[in-house]
Image (cartoon, rainbow, N blue to C red):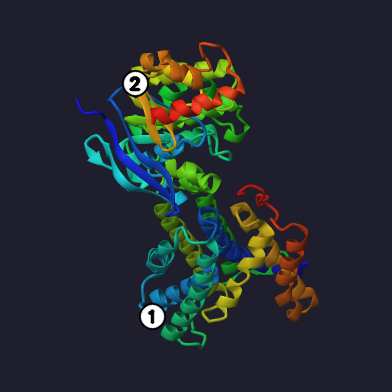
Amino acid sequence: MDVFLQLTVSGLSTGMVYALAAAGFVVIYKASDVINFTQGDLLLLGTYLIFFAVSQTGLPWSLGVLVTVLLAVAVALAIERLVLRPLIGEPIISMIMVTIGLSSVLRGLVNAIWGPAPRAFESFLPSGDIVIGPAVLSTGRLLSIPIALAVLAALALFFRHTRDGIAMRAIADDQQAALSMGISISRVFGVAWALAAASAAIGGIMLGNIVGVSPNVASIGLRVFPVVILGGLDSIRGAVIGGAIIGLLEVYTGGYVGHGLSLVVPYVVLILVLMVRPYGLFGKEIIERV
Amino acid sequence: MDPLLKLNNIEVLYDDVILVLRGLSLEVGNGRIAALLGSNGAGKTTTLKAISGLLHVEDGEVTDGTIVFDGEEIQGVDAHRIVEKGIFQVLEGRRVFEHLTVRENLAAGAYTRRDRRGTDADLEKVFHYFPALAERRRQTAGHLSGGEQQMLALGRALMASPRMMLLDEPSLGLAPILVESIFEIIQRINRDEGTTILLVEQNARLALSVADFGYVMEGGRVVMEGTADELRTNEDVKEFYLGLGDAGRRSYRDVKHYRRRKRWLS
């Protein structure tokens, strides 16, 4: 039972990191139909940026988080403005291919700046353990769950109540009608990339704290795909629940079956979902857009 | 006084090859309602999209001529800038955001506005014009009836508080009694808000009953224009658009006669 509880907390905490990265992915997909392959690399970027801000520059962690998020947003806005905006109106597939290329560029850039070796990073989430009955749970991991949920809730509120949030949903619903309201597509795409980068950066910061700073984070970023396929490409709620399910599945198979299998499980889920329910748990069935 | 909107000899090309408008000119006086009539494919919707800037996304382009709004040339300007300048197009077929609530649809209409107080007041105004929407403000727009969706489409336009509305077939697919009330409200908007209106309608009789001035389009240009009264009593318009020929319904053979006359017109 104690093992189960520990696995659950650990699975949920990584699951929430997945959810943060996946939510960013969903935001971009909703606004522009672009499948953003750089989402995992934005996560990696977040991890190294917090290392840069806190360990290398010596900023207090609160300021470091702010700087990390702002820098990540700046990078995403640059990508959107310089690379993707000129492609608006081109077939979606060209934009998607471009994000695949950008993914390598980002990863290479991180590697060039910080090197391939793992870096020492002192976690600023409170260390120590919380003991519940027989189980010993890491405080840092436990804490990252409400933090992630708060960020995701903020994202959901943004969509529901702000001018840009409503504009994004309007574009997802009917692009031409949205244009006729005076909604600026390029502005909305910019906001989408900024949000995606911000939530990925927060995910990256949490990863740096719970698993450390190393290029391996990029492979964690790849889990975004099973998560969004399971949750549905266009659903924030799907990102949260998909993230939790994939995170839990991983640690349970890792804990009860074997480490090797836990690496494969997310992708087995991905294939199964594509066969049975290609629009995911909460995705809109794609019948419109003829 | 200069007209609020003036199209001078505009030419619209789709995909760089298909000429849809060939030298179209028309004007709409400030505070007036002008009707744009014509059969399917005459270029009415294209004309509206040329004005509102929505052509770009469809690979269409104004290749010649000028569109002047309030003394300023606006051809080729981005759609969102044109909404900011005060022209709002209500697209054919209602096009409400189906997954958004009524309230959110109206908020989307006010997207270009920054004055919170003004938009709040306009929201009340929309609910005053369309009490049915007030009752359903929290409902998802996709679940509204056709008439309510058309009201919502007009409500969205009101939320932008535009100087000019371009209405594309507001009667499309609505029951006659609803059409009547929609047109009544269009007239009220024009009268009470002072909004200038360019109205595209298949239903010529209806359009001429509310318009001050009308244009008849065919093959991408204006072939006839006049005050609503002139057009209503014009024999050709009566015959081809109002279905009121002197001799009643003509036989199919007489279509030849129709073609001959049309050539003469253009």
Q: Is residue A130 visible?
A: no
Q: Residue A81's quadrant in the figure?
A: bottom left
Residue name at image x 56 percent, y 58 percent? A26
**Subunit of mark 1?**
A
**Subunit of mark 2?**
B
Label 2 element class: strand
Q: Give the class, few, some or many, for how many residues have Cα within 10 Å of label 1's Cα (few <14, many ≥20).
A: few
**Is A242 drawn above or below residue B65 in the view shown?**
below
Q: Residue B147's quadrant in the figure?
A: top right
Q: Which residue is mark 2?
A: B226
Q: Which residue is mark 1?
A: A56
In the rendered image, residue B161, in percent from the top left (x then y), is placed at 35, 30
Q: Residue B230's quadrant in the figure?
A: top left
Front residue of this view, candidates B19 and A48: B19
Q: Residue furthest right?
A: A257
**Is B54 drawn above or below residue A92 in the view shown?**
above
Q: Do the dots labelled 2 and 1 sit on one chain? A: no
